Image: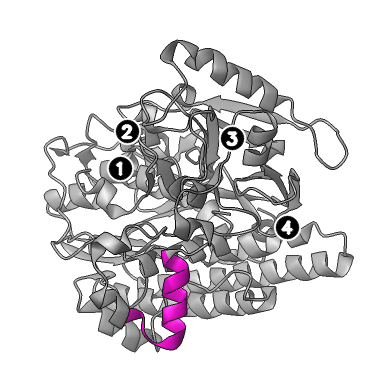
Amino acid sequence: MPLIEQGDMPVMKSFIDNGVHGILKSTFPPLTCPAWFSFSTGKNPGKLGMYNFYRLERKSYQIKRFDNHDVANENELWDILNSQGYTTGIFNNPVAYPPKPVDGFMISGFLAPSTFSNFTYPKSLKGKLDSVTGGYELDADQGDRFTAKEVIENCHRIMKKRTKAMKFLLEEENKDFMMLVYTGTDRISHQLINKMYSEDESEAAWAKEEIRKFFTALDGEIGELLDTLSGEEYTLFVMSDHGFHRRDKGFYLNQWLINEGYLVLKDPTSILGKIGLTQKGIASLLEKVGLKNFVRGIVPKSIEKRVPIGVIEGKGRSILDLIQTGGIDWSKTRAVALPGGIYLNSVDRPEGIVENENYTALRNEIAEKFKNITDPRDGSDLEVEILFREDIYTGQYVENAPDIQFIIGGYEWGAIRNIPADGRLYDPLKTAHHDDKGIFIVTGQGIKQGKKIENANIIDLTPTILAAYGIKPPSDMDGKVLNEIFVSAPEFHASADDTESASLESDTAGYTPEEEKAIEERLRGLGYVD
């Protein structure tokens, strides 16, 4: 916490001095999804079936991306508080799209496709947010179309709008429980942390100074928010869903699987796939000429479904598009790498060839080989940590997890799943990425002062917040109550075991292809997908 220690963040320092703080261990992988869902449910990803933004569905080759529909039947923190008579206000939860109807309000974060979507509950909040912010924005623009300086400007602009929206919500829509999220810390870190290690000393100094200026400004914004609550008693939890780490080296994982004989490609069977025509590409073209909505209204669904979506594009061929257009020879493929890790082509899939009795031996074989990969640049050894799904998850959806997961070079390397045309195994990466060391600070009513906590986990927060309200957490939660943060051990006056979660509203359908395109471009700009 160098910025806090050197005096650049006095508000955060006051929280630490007058409360409890420590590292908050995230999920694995330490990603927005599953981390925010594990936070809100108090459950590990194995009970939710979420291991990344995407997953290869069991017994199929279907790729699924997660959203709030996937926790529609889960009792999240706000469901439990509502069931006990407490009102809740949730602002800018990154994964909460579509928003759940709650006793209070819920405003979706960056997985909402646009401000034209129904991203607020109640819907009437959209106009109010526009009014108080001068035009509400979902997220800071990023990606190859923007320079680093433009991204920084976007992050500062969005941060100020977030504060305006939060002040309005605290003053006009205040609830018993409020969850307010700034995402600019994530966006600025993706953009600048790699540059802090640049061999160009002037670039490294510039990046460090820009990070200092942003976090100093954020500290001031938080202080401004707290002024809104002056005179009120409250308990304040400060947390992040993950930490951050330099990640500037990329390893082409599917190319390695091809080289080792585990993945075999063939020409796409779809004519449209062969010529590279996808729903995303068509939508982009039609949007440019102003015909997107007209054409979408007259094209039958049966035809639309035959056109590849074009799920992820980037350097080389997209592995997801290859799956969709018949570009993988499953009769010869034993493993494929997708977002989240390596999946084996087991016999329960339509064209699976890995027999149950061979599963463990094959998984161990791939893991051992991958554990010994070398740096493609100079042949030096790479530090690789292998993680099997049953070692890190528990619950009914463990078998939906990737068969092999890993950390390369202590998070400094990222896996690239696209397949390069020239067969190379290495490319530099522009965007920094996450590690599992988030922040945890709690201060205020009933909280000890000046204490450091060890072994806090993101799944502990919901049980601990419920305990602060005197509610005994449900027995199916994996997280524990962090009793050591309280001056006096919480006393329970209610139990959450009988809670029924709020259902999503009937008009919360899935994303259109052009909305999927918008979300995936957003994820790519942040370095979450290739």
Nearer-N-terminus badge (3/2) = 2
Q: Amino acid at mark 2?
A: Lys
The answer to which of 407 and 129 lies nearer the viewer is 407
Q: CA distance from mark 1 to mark 3?
A: 39 Å
Judge from the rendering whether residue 1 lies leftward or rightward of residue 511; answer left or right.
Answer: right
Nearer to me, 314 or 131: 314
Mark 3 residue type: Val
Q: Circle 2 is placed at which residue position?
A: 47
Q: CA distance from mark 3 to mark 2?
A: 33 Å
Is residue 183 positioned above or below 35 on the image?
below
**Which label's residue is closer to the chain start, 1 or 4?**
1
Q: Which residue is mark 4?
A: 194
Point out the frontmost of discs 3 and 2: 3
> Label 4 near label 3: C-beta < 8 Å?
no
**Mark 1 sits on what residue?**
41
Category of crowding for the residue at label 2, using alpha-carbon neighbours closer than 10 angstroms: few (below 14), some (14–19), many (at least 20):
some
* Mark 1 vs mark 4, CA separation in Å: 33 Å
- Residues drawn in magenta: 279-293
Question: Where is mark 3, residue-wise?
Answer: 264
Q: Where is residue 485 drawn, in percent x and y?
A: 42, 40
Query: Alpha-carbon neighbours of circle 4 within 10 Å: few (<14), some, or many (≥20)?
Result: many
Q: Is residue 314 left or right of residue 167?
A: right
Task: Evaluate if marks 1 and 2 touch, with contact meaning CB atoms under 8 Å apart.
Answer: yes
Q: Amino acid at mark 1?
A: Thr
At x 48% / y 22%, what residue is drawn?
391
Q: Magenta span has 251?
A: no
Q: Earlier in the sequence, mark 3 or mark 4?
A: 4
Q: CA distance from mark 4 to mark 2?
A: 34 Å
